[in-house]
Amino acid sequence: QLTFKDIEGIDQVKTEIRELVEFLKNPKRFIDLGARSPAGVLLVGAPGTGKTLLAKAIAGEAGVPFFSAAGTEFMEVFVGVGASRVRDMFQKARKAAPCILFIDEFDGIGQQRSSTSMGSDESVQTINQLLTEMDGFEDNSGVIVMAATNRPAALDTALTRPGRFDRIIHLPLPNLQGRIGILKVHARNKKIEEGLDYHKVARATAGFTGAELMNLMNTSAVVAVRRGAKFITEADVFQKMGRGSTASQYDEDIVPPVLRKTIAVYEAGRVLLGYISPGYDEISQVSVCPGGVPTGYTYFIPQEEHLESRVITRGYMEARMVVGIAGRCAERLVLGEANITTAGGGDLDNVNNIAREMVYRCGFSKRLGPVALMDTEEVFIGKGRTRAVANIGTELAAIALTDIEELVEGAEAKAYYGLAVNYKPLQALVERLLVKETMSGKEVEETL
């Protein structure tokens, strides 16, 4: 059984979690004080943040039975099957109380009922049965219903009212100390070289979920096996972190020298602008054609305060646009207008998306002023998005588009100017990348 010793990175929610454990261990203590038992607990978080793992650990820590099911298991073609399965599941839980009844992928069963849904719909009957069962719990039943979802906006509002899933626990991305703990947990059963700096790895993995950290340690072990080593080194971890899902090694001869230089120019442009932009993210690593793969990457370490608060400034958004379009500008400056490649298509999409967000959602439009152009949609079954661009007129849309174009063109002008002024450092970085292939943030700083 899993316990709290097997999980890390949940310091922010430990207080609420321990209350649940205490109730499961000694429900009489709460009942004697007149405290109502929590009817339902909803775990909300991005995929991979450990919602299912946490529910299992709570049951293991309290030493109570753990019943689990996925929301999709209740939905069938035949009407009434889902409601029947809900009844059976709750009946088993009552007999085994105190226990935890866990429903994973809860949005598969508890999606919002729309006004167009018929009373005979399988999904509607299943939700209605779930609501009925939860209303039937007594305060001393000893059954805690837990559910997990990464789409809380898609849930029916009747499920989150007091008396049902009234305890909502948000699982954020792990902070620095949480990531260090998670890395150490997944290193327990692996042969790690002495001196591996977990703090350094944790800083470089800002924004990673617990599942991504677990996968990083597992795939790092594969890298070590592939090179015939007996221990996993820090270099193995950083190599896998940079290459992501690229697992195959290729002969370097498949990357022509001209393409290799083009990739080096593109990545060097992004690195240089990221380095000189005030307040921008720290450079962790840059690589050109790693393992002979005809691609490149630049990894910046996201700032902890941005990840935890999700509040960023206009200046930071503009800096992201400048860095995003810098690779394209570097190609134009070094290789010429005719040799700009399609490699920056993805980055260009990101730049345009940031500009749209600034105009449509953040009210940073120069002509329209602090006006948000986003509407709230009614959440119908099958729709995951709850926000969309408002139904604005042609004239207003043209003004907004003009502002978006100016933001993107302004970012391009800043990037081109920054690269032109720092042309010699740009050339030095390109030459160093072609020789070394992969450079750390410290090596980049020494070069510039």
Image (cartoon, helix red, strand yellow):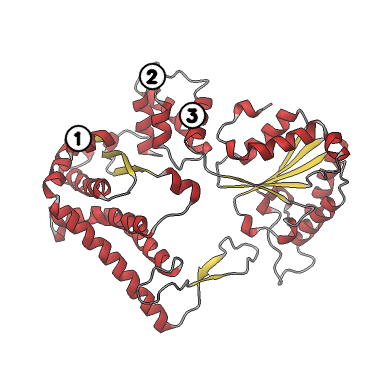
In the depicted view, which residue is nearer to us: 354 or 372? 372
Q: Residues within 10 Å of mark 1 (few under 14, many from 20)?
A: few
* 302 w.r.t. 373: above or below: above
Rounded to the nearest whole Å, what is the CA distance between mark 2 and mark 3?
A: 14 Å
Disc 2 secondary structure class? loop
Dividing the picture into quarters, in which one does residue 438 lie? top left
Would residue 345 appear left or right of 431 to someone viewing this image?
right
Q: Earlier in the sequence, mark 2 or mark 1?
A: 2
Q: Residue flagged by tag 2: what amino acid is it?
A: Gly
Q: Which mark is residue 446?
A: 1
Identify which residue is drawn at 41% across, 78% down.
397
| Quadrant (top left, top right, bottom left, bottom right) of the N terminus | top right
Mark 2 sits on what residue? 195
Q: Residue flagged by tag 1: what amino acid is it?
A: Glu
Residues at marks 2 and 3 touching, judged by CB atoms closer than 8 Å: no
Mark 3 sits on what residue? 183
* 269 w.r.t. 283: above or below: below
Residue 296 placed where, x, y %?
Answer: 28, 43
Would residue 394 appear left or right of 166 to someone viewing this image?
left
Residue 444 placed where, x, y %?
Answer: 23, 38
| Quadrant (top left, top right, bottom left, bottom right) of the C terminus | top left
Q: Earlier in the sequence, mark 2 or mark 3?
A: 3
Residue 284 placed where, x, y %?
Answer: 32, 38
Rounded to the nearest whole Å, what is the CA distance between mark 3 and mark 1?
A: 29 Å
